[in-house]
Amino acid sequence: MDKHSGTITNHARLHIPDVVNASNADDPFKLFYGKTPSLFYFGRGALWHALKTMELSAADNIIVPAYHCGVEIETIVMTGIQLRYYAIQEDLAIDLNGLASLMDTGTKALLLIHYFGFPQPVEAIRDLCISRDIVLIEDCSHALFSCYQEKPLGTFGDVAIFSQRKTLPLPDGGALMVNNPLLVAPFPSGKPGEFMAIKKAFGMLARTTLHIETRTGLPPPLSNIVAILDRIIAKKAGIRYSAGHEVNLDRCTLAMSRTSTWLMNGTRAEQIIETRRNNYLWLAKSLQSSHCIKIIKEELPDGVCPLFFPIMTVGINRQELQDMLAAAGIDIFIFGKELHESLPTHLFPGATELSRRVVCLPIHQELSLSEMVYITDTVQRIVQELEHADHH
Ligand SMILES: Cc1ncc(COP(=O)(O)O)c(C=O)c1O
């Protein structure tokens, strides 16, 4: 396949059958995790409320990973608690001794990110936290429907947060699961403007159905319709909700929209897990580490529902690879491109390398085998071209 029609997006898109199949019948959280969490507009709102369940003071500290997206760290910074960073190695591993050495009597919590859906050694870390009386916050923003030894991630920690809008094509959605009975599960206090969610869902559907690339704007008359909707929403709700890197505390109190909840309840977890796993396994089988790219996770353990297929650019320029893939219609994602400004990067070479070199290839539930073949062929071709150009 030389050219692919349309862009292969890095996240699953919303399709009309998703809307047709949506229902209020089954909550996938209830089905998969055995309980219904508090549903928030974004994951950051869930994290903010998780921190609010603890009585934190400015003298307390929280242990956080050096490799992150920035939003979770900024949310924590806004509580006024002190940060202590722990190292993340290039293979996403954590040094448990290093972790333990950061803990003292002021340590109240530890944030553990299951990157790209892959479980961290959550049992060992939970035991360490229990022995030091520290709250374990599992960040499952990448790990919806992922398990560790047949037990869902998010059920090990005292609390867990999710950002289900990353795995599922939803206009909004975060969640907070409280597992420790000593902590009181908080609920969002604000309702989002429902028009905004409907507009976002409409935009998502229009893009998919009309094959409009995410990078380009909508053509008229759609752009006119959207402009009118924008004005109505601004009048009704008075605000816009952005999923950018800023953390706005007013927005953190918002619940997941009813539109998004309705769409989420049409989700078939088993199908999503199976397709994501098959697509991941395809790439793991077809792409090899070389002196240009390094596969971060060659193995896909049982029970993992991966968010992406992460690779590291080694001998080639990441931006060049990203641009060439975009020109071939493949939209990649970069996680942790801008690390939080409070991180002393020179002390954390692993996280800094990940931040500079990671490329997340799409493997989501919407991609067919022929699209996966196209991704493999294109990555191989471009890597060869870049390698070749490097030699001359
Ligand atoms: C690891 C991690 N935690 C938390 C968040 C926050 O999720 P949200 O964007 O839904 O607020 C994100 C993404 O932004 C993330 O990647």
Image (cartoon, grey):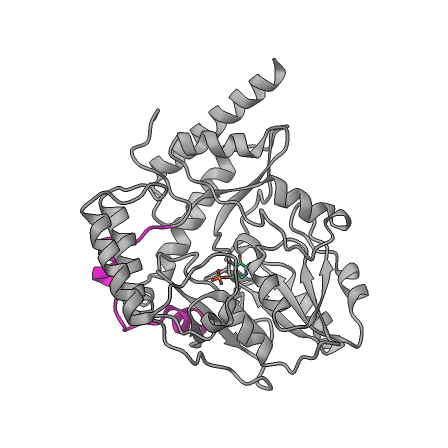
Camera-nearest residue between 9 and 223: 223
Whether the magenta-drawn stretch holds residue 172 is answered as no
Q: Residue at x 44, y 57 (%)?
A: 166
Whether the magenta-drawn stretch holds residue 21 is answered as yes
Task: State the count of labels.
Answer: 0
Quadrant of the rendered image containing residue 102: bottom right
Camera-nearest residue between 200 and 186: 200
Q: Residue at x 45, y 66 (%)?
A: 42
- Give the quarter of the figure containing the N terminus: top left
Camera-nearest residue between 324 and 122: 324
Quadrant of the rendered image containing residue 157: bottom right
Q: Can you name the residue that lies furthest to the top here?
A: 392
**For residue 161, above or below residue 351:** below
Quadrant of the rendered image containing residue 179: bottom right
Q: Is residue 199 left or right of residue 95?
A: left
Q: Which residues are magenta?
A: 12-33
Q: Can you name the residue that lies furthest to the left here?
A: 221
Percent coordinates x, y for residue 264 in the rendering: 34, 65
**For residue 74, above or below residue 306:** below
**For residue 264, above or below residue 352:** below
Q: Residue at x 70, y 46 (%)?
A: 350
Percent coordinates x, y for residue 373 in the rendering: 39, 33
Q: Is residue 113 left or right of residue 99?
A: left
Percent coordinates x, y for residue 230 in the rendering: 28, 60
Camera-nearest residue between 168 and 318: 318
- Give the quarter of the figure containing the C terminus: top right
Percent coordinates x, y for residue 296 in the rendering: 60, 43
Q: Residue at x 58, y 21 (%)?
A: 387
